[in-house]
Image (tube, rainbow, N blue to C red):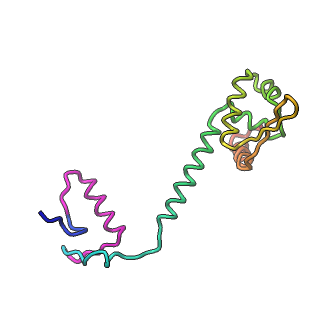
Amino acid sequence: MTSPPIGAAINWPNPSVSVAVRRLTLHLGIERNGDEPLGGIENIRHEPEQETDFDALIAAANEASTFLKALGHDGRLMILCYLMSGPKSVTELENLLSSRQAVVSQQLARLRHEGLVSARRDGQTIFYSILDPKVVDLLTVLKKLFGTDC
């Protein structure tokens, strides 16, 4: 049994497969003249690579998603709001949040892991501050949107 020429109409059991094959042949630039394809690989259009733009979009979307997930917890958001006014110790953050040390430390660990805050040790005290400038930008936008101060 011979396979049909590239881009030939095939009746697939699943209509979405047929649509996907058609889109792929169009993407590859395989031209059709009536029912006959115009030939093999030499007839594929060579256009500028658009995959890199798509790959960059995917990478940016993943980065934004990870960033927003890190901010997607009220405790972490509050910590970052308090850090907007300057570095704070874990004890200061505990008092400001009325929360236990273990909970605050867990949220700080996530923020540190995501590269949003930095830690500085002074004796036995650890001070946290905002590391990523995007945090300040986003919190400023959130303040405008929701009309609250951090």
Q: Quadrant of residue 43?
A: bottom left
Q: Is residue 41 magenta?
A: no
Q: Is residue 11 magenta?
A: yes
Decide: is 6 above or below 115.
below
Locate residue 129, reporting x and y percent: 79, 40
Q: Which segment did they paint magenta?
A: 10-34
Decide: is 24 above or below 136.
below
Q: Quadrant of residue 99?
A: top right
Residue drawn at x 25%, y 58% as measured from the top left: 18
Q: Is residue 147 left or right of residue 48?
A: right
Q: Is residue 44 left or right of residue 76?
A: left
Residue drawn at x 25%, y 75% as measured from the top left: 32
Locate residue 42, reporting x and y percent: 32, 78
Residue drawn at x 19%, y 75% as measured from the top left: 36
Camera-side residue: 125 or 51?
125
Decide: is 85 above or below 50.
above
Q: Quadrant of the N terminus?
A: bottom left
Toward the right, the furthest residue is 123
Toward the left, the furthest residue is 1
Q: Quadrant of the C terminus?
A: top right
Residue drawn at x 18%, y 73% as measured from the top left: 35
Camera-side residue: 103 or 18?
103
